[in-house]
Image: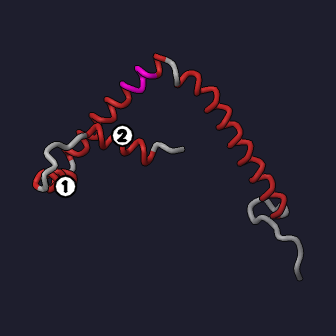
């Protein structure tokens, strides 16, 4: 006996449930875009530049702390030093983390 597929959680037709999920996802995406657009004006202000500088300093300090506490990371730093890289830059590491993981 075949019939309409039913969502096991709601008991509603699967097609309806999927359509509602898609509409909810689209509404969420639209809301996110609107919030981001509203944020752009604030993000380009002088106050935002100061705030971003402070955040970058904090992240850099945190990366430095984490690396200094991690034996494996310290070993990698020592290897880099032996191969000619004279200075580990927590600031560069922080920027790389933001570049890699900062995309939403």
Is 69 contained in the magenta span? Answer: no
Question: In this rendering, is residue 82 above or below 46?
Answer: below
Magenta region: 49-53
Helix, strand or loop for disc 1: helix
Task: Choose between 69 and 57: the one closer to the eye.
Answer: 57
* 41 lies left or right of 56: right
Q: Which quadrant is the C terminus positioned in? A: top right
Helix, strand or loop for disc 2: helix
Q: Residue at x 44, y 47 (%)?
A: 101
Reading the image, the residue beneath label 1 is 76
- Mark 1 Cα within 10 Å, few/some/many (few <14, many 20+)? few
Question: Residue 76: x and y, percent?
Answer: 19, 55
Image depth: mark 2 or mark 1 in front:
2
Reading the image, the residue beneath label 2 is 95
Question: Residue 99: x and y, percent?
Answer: 42, 44
**Marks 2/1: CA distance?**
18 Å
* 30 lies left or right of 17: left
């Amino acid at each position: 006996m075949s019939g309409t597929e039913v969502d096991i959680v709601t008991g509603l037709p699967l097609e309806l449930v999927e359509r509602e999920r898609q509409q909810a996802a689209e509404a969420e995406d639209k809301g996110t875009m609107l919030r981001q657009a509203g944020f752009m004006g604030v993000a380009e202000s002088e106050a935002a530049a100061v705030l971003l500088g402070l955040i970058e300093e904090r992240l850099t300090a945190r990366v430095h702390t984490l690396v200094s506490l991690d034996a494996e990371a310290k070993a990698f730093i020592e290897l880099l030093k032996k191969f000619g890289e004279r200075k580990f830059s927590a600031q560069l590491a922080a920027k790389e983390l933001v570049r890699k993981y900062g995309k939403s």
